[in-house]
Amino acid sequence: MTGAERKLWQTINKSMNNRTKTGIKLALLTALISGLANFLNKEVLISGVDAVSLTLVKNTLVGLGFLAILFVSFKKLPKIKLKEIWKLLTVALVGGSISFLLFFKGLSLASATTGSLIHKSLFLWVALLAFIFLGEKFKKYQLAALGLLALGLVLLSKITNFSFGRGELMMLIATLLWSLEVIFVKKFLKNTNFKILAAARMFLGSLFILGFVLLGGQTLHITDISASGWLKILVVAGFLFGYVFTWYKALSLAPANLVTSILTLALPITILGDQISARAIPTLNLFFGILLFTLAIYSLLKLNPWRKELINN
């Protein structure tokens, strides 16, 4: 563990209540999972598995996993009122289907680092939507920290040789949908268990994906997937399950802006994995980007502007 990471971890333990501390630690774990998953998903696509089949199979497996979790977690499944069904359908449609199809189709046309770069801009869109729809106000030091994160993204974009095309546009739209999902989820979590929302997102979302594929007349190539392809899909499905579980749990415990800001740490992980795979030497931009991310998140944790607002959330 580096000195910066140790200092970051010490700040977590000193400044946050137990509930929020748990959420932050889960967000850090989410960032690690996400950073590795972006790289691994691209490797699966490169191996010949088409984006639609990968998305449908992987999400269905994760959805079934969350259904199993529900049966294990609840001796008696909670009754869902009719007026709450729309919440589950909204999460499934916005966060679990359209966004996945767009993102992974876009990822098949671009690099893993570009996809991670676009996805990690999530914190900017969530901050904007939280200001508009949740009435969250930001102090100067919060805005400064968000500015450092944005500057870090700019620095790391130079490593990715970022250019904007069809694939990048699809991933940006997906990221905007996921940022909207975060706002919905934060509202829904007040009355709904995160496991139920996660199960709806992934299982109902996979049904929506299947519906879109059938309506669009697309051909699925699931039967063409090789044994090694299935093994790779199982691996990335495991990562996706871990991502969704830790992500939703973190959102249930900590402020959305803080959780999405921490998620930016996934980007240098993806870039590092990509550079190791290409046997490239890490650049100064990568180190400076990591430094800016660490400083920004350290500032958010140290100043802790959300503690009083979220202590009973």
Image (tube, rainbow, N blue to C red):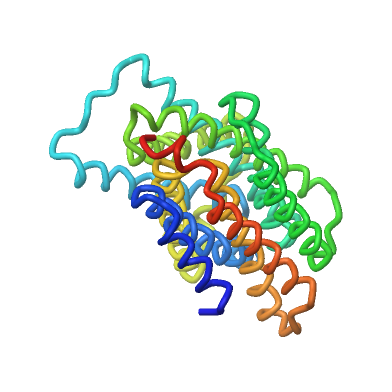
Horizontal and vertical percent position of residue 157: 80, 60
Q: Is residue 93 above or below residue 261?
A: above
Residue 311 lies in quadrant: top left
Residue placed most toward the observer, 220 or 187: 187
Q: Nearer the viewer, residue 166 or 279?
A: 279
Q: Which residue is at 42% across, 60% downward? A: 14
- For image coordinates 61% across by 38% down, the residue present is 179
> Which of 52 and 184 lies nearest the eye of the viewer?
184
Res 45 seen here: no
Left or right side of 182 for 106 = right
Farthest residue, direction top: 83
Q: State the image coordinates of residue 166 (x, y, percent, origin top left).
A: 81, 45
**200 w.r.t. 89: above or below:** below
Where residue 217 sits in the image (x, y, percent)? 62, 34
Q: Quadrant of residue 99?
A: top right
* Quarter containing the C terminus: top left
Image position of 170 (left or right of 93): right
Look at 52% across and 70% down and name the residue there: 7
Q: Residue placed at 45% from the left, 26% from the top?
A: 89
Total labels drawn = 0
Q: Position of residue 306 (x, y in %)?
A: 51, 41
Relative to 109, is 179 above or below? above
